[in-house]
Image (spheres, rainbow, N blue to C red):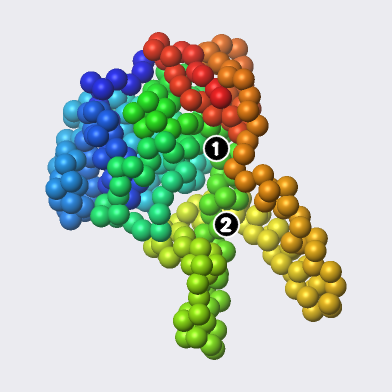
């Protein structure tokens, strides 16, 4: 079954992403309610027009079709167990976390693995909290949506319809491992490098004048490093194997660059290696649209292969059975 405007979405956690999600869905006419453990956050959300429940029990008592876990990664396990106490039998559980294997483990540990579909919107800012939320932040965003061998086709269709419908986004259907490796490369390692650049300048003997002279390159290179360090730390440590692996490549390449600089050897290979990516920008191959029928033999492998090739789901048919892939 697909999501319609008469069905309800519950959002647990109303920070930057959860708050933006609740506000965006409300603007699109979706019946959405939220809850946050912070009374201050709940008051801010209420003032912004979000309907807020008094607790997870009240939130789930309204029988939402979809429950979105939008709490910090380190609160995910405890929150999943609390949600499991009250979750309606027909509800689908999804999330917005930037690491998927760890969240699936937390949800499965709460007994909700058979109702879980992973999700991660590739959107955000260096700010946090409901005050930084924006109903336009997630509209039209690219999402990673993850599954495993036990994912129910109907549950997957429900989450995909939410993403491609009222949120107007596209969804790359992936396995947890592919998502976590990709997120390490394009999100988590950049956060580490931005943090290290801040560390480098903050501890330099000439920090004051360096900061005074800093312009666009320093601003752009450190933007994501200016977020809450505990949030960044949690994101990196929860995805430790993939982040560590990527950072070893970074260290190898930087050590080679240092050696070349110290020996006056050529550095061209380092600076030219990514030329194809540098000149391609964001262009992607245009493919004829494909369709995948959920439940047909091999549908999981087909979807995740298309997702890993950079081909997103852009729509779901009315019956929630056939996906349109760009």
Q: Report whether 13 appears left or right of 50.
A: right
Which residue matches tag 1? 176
Q: Residue at x 47, y 86 (%)?
A: 208
Query: Can residue 81 be seen by looking at this rendering?
Result: no
122 shown above or below 268 = above
Reading the chain from its start, which is encountered first: label 1 or label 2? 1
201 shown above or below 159 = below
Q: Which mark is residue 109?
A: none
The percent position of residue 151, horizontal first and vertical second, equals 48, 24
7 shown above or below 11 = above
Label 2 crowding class (10 Å Cα cut-off): few <14, some 14-19, many 20+? Answer: some
Which residue matches tag 2? 189
The percent position of residue 45, horizontal first and vertical second, equals 19, 47
Q: Residue at x 57, y 57 (%)?
A: 189
Q: Secondary structure at mark 1?
A: helix
Q: Nearer the viewer, mark 1 or mark 2?
A: 2
The percent position of residue 87, horizontal first and vertical second, equals 27, 30
Q: Secondary structure at mark 2?
A: helix
Quadrant hosting residue 271 = bottom right
Q: Residue at x 33, y 21 (%)?
A: 3
């Amino acid at each position: 079954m697909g999501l319609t405007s008469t069905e309800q979405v519950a959002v647990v956690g109303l920070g930057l992403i959860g708050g933006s999600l609740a506000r965006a869905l409300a603007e699109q006419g979706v019946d959405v309610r939220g809850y946050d453990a912070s009374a201050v956050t709940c008051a801010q959300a209420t003032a912004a027009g979000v309907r807020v429940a008094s607790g997870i029990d009240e939130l789930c008592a309204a029988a939402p079709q979809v429950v979105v876990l939008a709490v910090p990664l380190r609160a995910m396990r405890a929150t999943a167990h609390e949600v499991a106490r009250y979750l309606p039998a027909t509800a689908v559980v999804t999330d917005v976390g930037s690491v998927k294997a760890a969240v699936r483990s937390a949800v499965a540990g709460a007994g909700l693995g058979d109702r879980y579909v992973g999700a991660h919107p590739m959107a955000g800012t260096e700010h946090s909290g409901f005050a930084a939320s924006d109903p336009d932040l997630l509209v039209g965003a690219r999402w990673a949506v993850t599954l495993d061998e036990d994912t129910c086709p109907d549950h997957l269709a429900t989450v995909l319809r939410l993403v491609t419908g009222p949120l107007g986004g596209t969804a790359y259907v992936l396995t947890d491992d592919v998502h976590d490796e990709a997120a390490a490369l394009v999100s988590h390692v950049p956060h580490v490098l931005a943090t290290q650049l801040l560390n480098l300048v903050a501890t330099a003997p000439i920090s004051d004048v360096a900061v005074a002279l800093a312009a666009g390159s320093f601003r752009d290179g450190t933007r994501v490093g200016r977020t809450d360090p505990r949030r960044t730390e949690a994101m990196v440590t929860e995805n430790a194997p993939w982040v560590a692996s990527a950072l070893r490549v970074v260290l190898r390449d930087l050590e080679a660059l240092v050696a070349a600089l110290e020996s006056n050897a050529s550095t061209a290979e380092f600076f030219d290696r990514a030329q194809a990516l540098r000149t391609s920008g964001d262009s992607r191959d245009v493919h004829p649209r494909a369709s995948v029928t959920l439940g047909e033999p091999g549908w999981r492998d087909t979807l995740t292969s298309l997702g890993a090739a950079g081909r997103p789901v852009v729509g779901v048919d009315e019956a929630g059975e056939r996906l349109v892939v760009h």
